[in-house]
Image (cartoon, coloured by chain):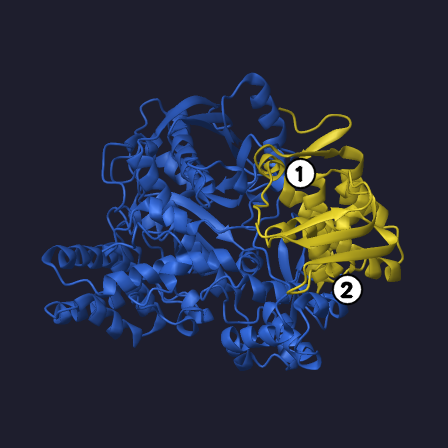
Chain colours: A blue, B yellow
């Protein structure tokens, strides 16, 4: 079953009574968003499918490394008649300078994805600017800027093993699934780079985050190339990673608070990301249980169990860890077996899962969505969100109040008039413009508050709307209350049922991890490992095919890779 | 392509919007007002030029005058059912504050004209005539598309002035770490 290819308007699909969609009050709860997992719609997977389907040609053009892997490396990408290059400059920095945070001055690897040919002038320009990262000044030839470091724990170990003619030992690697870890992927106009909306129609990287994920995939290639090069430099008879290991490692990533402001500022994007999942879930739930579909699902249950059990490990507050997820997968599988002869076994499995822990619910959804086969071009088009909505400021105060009553009733559950509701405020640090949150009682926001306090703003707007003449327009109201511009624009834009996380990000109890995990899962990251309430480590592209495999193997079943040898 | 020469620098529209928003906050504008002003300046810089220089002019106003001038575009609204409307500004208002709102009205089927020459963002506007039309027109200009794909060339001197003010929006890492 697929989302209709003939109806491209997301809002039309969401209003189609044939789609049985889950209500926003269930989907947009912070804990629900914080339990979401990667699906086939996640950007890492859709990027690889596109590369394989359209036979992108990716070639390693230059490897200019010394014996320690310092130098530069260039990949050439021909994608649907567009030419790109990924250029990485590599170094070795002191271990003490490695940090997971976005703030740093030096990195082992800095890199850029550029469109077009590379000549000496451009290479020199990149050599001068790319290592400076946030202090660089780029231009629209550059699409993505990134950086990262070698794994302190494993890079040298992997070099030694290969140099000794041996493969890695699973027990030494623990739950690590990467060789290098990135800390940022900048794009969309930052530092003078090409704006996302500046990609023309049919451009192979015009889907959201496609350019960033192509860069991330190539960053992972650099990590493999670097380790194997250094091993060969130590011993000309060094071996390469064998078939089992050559796809196992992904790219590590550490993510901080920056994802929270992004989520709160992009309601249209949130709505489209979630709506696509919900539409697909609606389709899958009402599939008949054909033998083929049941077999596909059984294979995914097996794969998930193998993955979680080979990864191993206890719970990772506030989430289940690999051991619990392995047990949950067995339970899900058993339950499905008991339902598999029903007329609508996938719907029955979902209804069972809905009554379980939210992580089980979301694990079931992520696996069920493997049965959806909506065309990628349809998904890409549904992901495109118009940036320039024209709010109708002739809307009356009475109508604004009605919009709040209809769409924001949930604000009443947030205790927005309590002191705790305003405990935090959000600010950008002068170090790499890193978003942070500060306690209002400790630091005065003055003029520095990032306006992502949407719940508080709409609540305050409602109070002032009650004082105004119901017949006047929003424009006239704003003349007296200009501070309500953001809230009114939010109401009038009406970005869709899944556009608002149902929480107050300034509240004392706000847990950033929920919105962070939601976005990371949408990107296609996994192995969520919270390090505090405010940041977490993840892995992406673990198990993914290598660029050299384009055209030679199945491109979409790479997720949930079992660690070679396993841990148990 | 080069991102910079002595007089100009290429910037992305979102960079300009971000910096005007931050710099406006530093001047004391409330977040909603700064957001609107940033969109106005960015639109004007792309489509007419002199957006940043106009903002730098506005930035010299005292807070009362600033508050009043920033409400100007909110008056540009043809009431439902009205065929036309003349909106007068005394003192005149810089076109940078009106341009985006006027262009947005076109998508609702409203045409407009100014009685003074409005060549750039800094052109002073005394009155605007709004008229109901029957044919809404698309508003995404070629200039906007070009700015998104190839960047927007702005005065380096003005960009640096804007950045210097905008940088004060950021909070010291030391203060944050100490809190």
Label 1 belongs to which residue?
A135
Q: Are marks 1 and 2 on the same chain?
A: yes
From the viewer's side, name the closer residue of A38 and B87: B87
Label 2 crowd bin: few (<14), some (14–19), many (20+), radius 10 Å:
few
Residue A138 figure quarter? top right
SS class, disc 2: loop
Label 1 crowd bin: few (<14), some (14–19), many (20+), radius 10 Å:
few
**Residue A422 seen by the camera:** no
**Residue B1 seen by the camera:** yes
Q: Of the two numbered discs 1 and 2 on the same chain, state the one appearing first in sequence.
A: 1
Q: Give percent across and percent down for residue A395.
A: 61, 68
- Residue in the picture at 75% in, 42% down: B51
Name the front one of labels 1 and 2: 2
Please give left or right for residue A467 compared with residue A234 in the image. right
The N terminus of chain A lies in quadrant: bottom left
From the viewer's side, name the closer residue of B142 and A137: B142
Q: Is residue B93 above or below residue A228?
A: below
Q: Give percent across and percent down for residue B48.
A: 72, 39
- Residue in the picture at 31% in, 51% down: A40
Label 2 belongs to which residue?
A446
């Amino acid at each position: 079953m697929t989302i209709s290819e003939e109806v491209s308007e997301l809002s039309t699909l969401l209003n189609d009574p044939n789609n049985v969609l889950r209500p926003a009050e269930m989907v947009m709860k912070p804990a629900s968003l914080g339990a979401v997992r990667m699906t086939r719609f996640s950007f890492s997977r859709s990027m690889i499918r596109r590369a394989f389907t359209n036979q992108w040609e990716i070639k390693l053009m230059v490897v200019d490394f010394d014996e320690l892997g310092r130098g530069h490396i260039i990949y050439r990408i021909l994608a649907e008649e567009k030419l790109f290059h990924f250029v990485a400059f590599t170094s070795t920095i002191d271990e003490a300078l490695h940090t997971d945070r976005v703030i740093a001055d030096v990195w082992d690897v800095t890199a850029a994805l550029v469109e077009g040919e590379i000549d000496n002038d451009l290479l020199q320009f990149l050599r001068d600017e790319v290592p400076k990262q946030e202090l660089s000044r780029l231009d629209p030839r550059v699409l993505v800027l990134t950086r990262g470091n070698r794994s302190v724990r494993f890079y040298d170990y992997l070099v030694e093993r290969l140099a000794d003619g041996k493969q890695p030992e699973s027990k030494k690697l623990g739950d690590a699934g990467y060789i290098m870890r990135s800390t940022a992927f900048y794009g969309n106009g930052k530092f003078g780079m090409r704006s996302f909306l500046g990609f023309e129609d049919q451009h192979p990287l015009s889907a959201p985050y496609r350019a960033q994920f192509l860069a991330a995939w190539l960053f992972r290639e650099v990590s493999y190339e670097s380790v194997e090069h250094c091993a060969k430099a130590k011993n000309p008879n060094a071996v390469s990673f064998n078939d089992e290991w050559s796809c196992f490692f992904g790219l590590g990533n550490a993510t901080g608070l920056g994802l929270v402001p992004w989520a709160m500022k992009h309601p249209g994007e949130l709505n489209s990301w979630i709506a696509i999942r919900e539409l697909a879930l609606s389709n899958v739930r009402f599939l008949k249980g054909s033998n083929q579909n049941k077999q596909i699902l059984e294979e995914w249950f097996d794969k998930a169990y193998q993955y979680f059990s080979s990864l191993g490990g206890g719970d990772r507050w506030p989430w289940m860890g690999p051991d619990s997820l392995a047990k949950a997968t067995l339970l899900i599988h058993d339950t499905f077996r008991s339902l598999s002869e029903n007329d609508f076994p996938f719907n029955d499995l979902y209804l069972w899962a809905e009554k379980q822990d939210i992580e089980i619910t979301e694990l079931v959804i992520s696996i069920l969505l493997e049965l959806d086969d909506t065309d990628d071009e349809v998904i890409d088009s549904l992901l495109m969100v118009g940036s320039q909505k024209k709010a109708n400021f002739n809307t009356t105060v009475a109508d604004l109040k009605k919009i709040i009553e209809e769409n924001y009733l949930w604000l009443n559950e947030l205790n927005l008039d309590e002191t705790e509701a305003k405990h935090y405020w959000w600010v950008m640090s002068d170090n790499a413009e890193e978003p942070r949150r500060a306690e209002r009682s400790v630091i005065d926001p003055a003029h520095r508050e990032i306006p992502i306090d949407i719940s508080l703003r709409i609540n305050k707007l409602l109070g002032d709307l009650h004082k105004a003449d119901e017949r006047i327009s929003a424009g006239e109201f704003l003349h007296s209350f200009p501070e309500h511009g953001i809230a009114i624009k939010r109401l009038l834009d009406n970005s869709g049922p899944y556009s608002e996380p149902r929480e107050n990000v300034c509240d004392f109890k706000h847990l950033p991890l929920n919105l962070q995990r939601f976005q990371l899962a949408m990107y296609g990251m996994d192995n969520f490992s919270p390090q505090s309430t405010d940041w977490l480590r993840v892995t992406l592209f673990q198990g993914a095919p290598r660029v050299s495999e384009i055209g030679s193997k199945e491109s979409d079943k790479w997720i949930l890779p079992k660690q070679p040898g396993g841990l148990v | 392509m080069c991102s910079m020469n002595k007089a100009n620098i290429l910037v992305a529209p979102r960079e300009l919007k971000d910096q005007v928003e931050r710099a406006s906050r530093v001047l004391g504008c409330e977040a909603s007002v700064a957001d609107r002003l940033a969109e106005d300046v960015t639109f004007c810089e792309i489509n007419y030029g002199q957006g940043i220089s106009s903002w730098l002019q506005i930035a010299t106003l005292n807070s009362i005058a600033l508050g009043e001038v920033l409400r100007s575009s909110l008056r540009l609204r043809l009431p439902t059912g009205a065929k036309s409307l003349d909106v007068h500004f005394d003192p005149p208002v810089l076109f940078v504050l009106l341009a985006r709102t006027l262009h947005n009205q076109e998508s609702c089927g409203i045409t407009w004209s100014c009685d003074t020459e409005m060549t750039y963002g800094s052109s002073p506007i005394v009155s605007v005539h709004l008229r109901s039309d029957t044919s809404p027109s698309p508003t995404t200009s070629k200039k906007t598309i070009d700015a998104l794909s190839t960047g927007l060339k702005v005065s380096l001197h003005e960009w640096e002035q804007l950045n210097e003010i905008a940088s004060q929006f950021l909070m010291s890492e030391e203060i944050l770490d100490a809190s």
